[in-house]
Image (cartoon, rainbow, N blue to C red):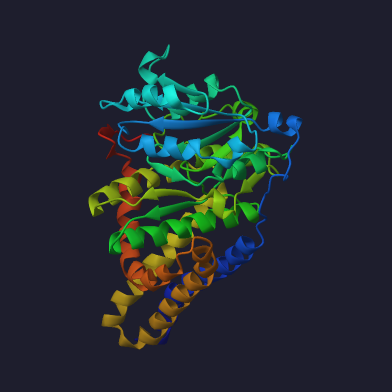
């Protein structure tokens, strides 16, 4: 190998890994500096009125999962504190007994529980964005909290969101999501999602929000309408969470928060199969090309470049053995940066044992990221029994 070729190889492999490591150092610092919002111990009546909440649950064929979530919501400490809460479940054209579950639960519910059917709306539509819009229009509270029908929440979940809602300047709160399940596939998904949650939280702390998770977020209804809701991205099937985050940050840069509170963790099951996992990740990736903000685009490119460079360097070293030391150094740098960043994040989730899966995830991540990224650019996928077409 010529000196010029070796120099090029070193730059191509070590350069992205070094940039990635620098980013992880910044993200770890931002994660550790995130505040923990707390409600006053004895909120006044006016305070409770000011932070009344509407919980929105978009559901499609969730008759098996929804009763567990509704039970969790009935155990919220915020209800015992005198907080005002209503629940709206939006049935997105379910073909099972989702609507029946809600109607039965309404008879014994400790909070106002309403069912909306997208099929009954004046302009029938499908999808989560349509469900969220219908619920926000019907909501009575000034602050809405969103989760998914297949999630589980802790008793302190609503109190954690109310703590942010109590701040006059607050407009949006992103919450942590933890994957549950057994086996290697569930653990690998859990590590990946924990990293995404941690990076998203750190981005908010740095004033450069990139991502959040629609299974655990909340925002002010007035702010939703002030930025015209999902206008401009309504044609994109996914992204009811991140597009809104980006729009709200542009309008209210000081009003975006992350709930670094263990009581705010929402749990949801990992995908049961590799095919289901790929379909979910393709759905997530399909919105990336529609981002208008620079921060999420830069981050996506950096992560993809760092992982692809490692794989390319590994393959190239079989043909150019002189490059092995530099490739190994790049792998060590990338893995070390991941461990450095994820140690406190996984500690927050009480899942530090997942650090042992990082080498396995690293080996699989480059082809996995390329596949989901390219399929996401194509835009078509199947989700919850629906075939979603590509959007432009």
Give residue 255's position: percent from left, percent from top: 68, 42
Pick whichever, 258 or 57, lies toward us: 57
Q: Quadrant of the N terminus?
A: bottom left
387 relative to 334 in the view: left or right: left
- Would you say residue 130 is visible in this rendering? no
In the depicted structure, whether residue 235 falls above or below residue 279: above
Residue 248: name its quadrant: top right
Residue lying at 52% horizontally and 58% vertically, measured from the top left: 198
- Above or below, comparing residue 311 to residue 235 in the picture: below
Looking at the picture, how far across and down is residue 384, in whole percent?
29, 36
Which of 367 and 276 lies nearest the eye of the viewer?
276
> Residue at left 32%, top 58%?
186
Q: Is residue 191 left or right of residue 54?
A: left
Q: How many marks?
A: 0
Name the residue nearer the viewer: 203 or 160: 160
In the image, taking residue 224 as reference, residue 8 lies left or right, namely left
Q: Is residue 183 left or right of residue 257?
A: left
Percent x, y for residue 81? 64, 38
Residue name at image x 64 percent, y 44 percent: 256
């Amino acid at each position: 190998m010529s000196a010029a070729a070796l120099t090029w190889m070193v730059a191509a492999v070590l350069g992205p890994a070094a940039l990635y490591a620098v980013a992880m150092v910044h993200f770890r610092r931002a994660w550790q500096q995130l505040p923990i919002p707390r409600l006053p111990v004895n909120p006044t009546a006016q305070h409770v009125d000011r932070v009344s909440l509407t919980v929105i649950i978009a559901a499609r064929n969730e008759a098996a999962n929804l009763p567990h979530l509704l039970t969790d919501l009935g155990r919220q400490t915020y209800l015992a504190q005198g907080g005002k809460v209503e629940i709206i479940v939006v049935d997105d054209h379910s073909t099972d007994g989702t609507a029946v579950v809600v109607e039965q639960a309404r008879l014994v519910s400790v909070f106002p529980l309403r069912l909306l059917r997208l099929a009954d709306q004046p302009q029938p539509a499908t999808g989560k964005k349509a469900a969220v819009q219908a619920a926000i229009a019907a909501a009575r509270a000034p602050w809405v909290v969103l989760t998914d029908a297949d999630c589980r929440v802790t008793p302190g979940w609503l109190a954690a969101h109310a703590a942010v809602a109590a701040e006059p300047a607050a407009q949006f709160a992103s919450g942590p999501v933890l994957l549950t399940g057994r086996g290697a596939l569930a653990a690998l998904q859990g590590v990946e999602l924990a990293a995404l949650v941690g990076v998203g939280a750190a981005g908010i702390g740095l004033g450069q929000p990139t991502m959040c998770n629609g299974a655990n977020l909340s925002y002010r209804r007035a702010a939703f309408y002030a930025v015209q809701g999902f206008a401009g991205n309504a044609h994109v099937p996914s992204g009811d969470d991140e597009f809104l985050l980006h729009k709200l940050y542009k309008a209210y840069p000081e009003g975006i928060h992350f709930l670094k509170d263990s009581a705010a963790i929402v749990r949801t099951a990992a995908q049961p199969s590799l095919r289901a996992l790929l379909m979910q990740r393709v759905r997530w990736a399909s919105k990336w090309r529609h981002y208008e903000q620079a921060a999420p685009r830069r981050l996506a490119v950096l992560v993809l470049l760092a992982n692809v460079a490692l794989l390319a360097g590994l393959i190239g070293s079989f043909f150019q053995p002189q490059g092995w030391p530099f490739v190994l150094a790049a792998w060590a740098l990338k893995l070390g940066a991941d461990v450095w960043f994820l140690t406190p994040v996984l500690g927050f989730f009480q899942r530090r044992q997942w650090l042992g899966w990082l080498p396995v995830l690293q080996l699989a991540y480059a082809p996995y990221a390329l596949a989901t990224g390219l399929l996401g650019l194509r835009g078509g996928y199947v989700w919850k029994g629906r075939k979603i077409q590509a959007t432009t």
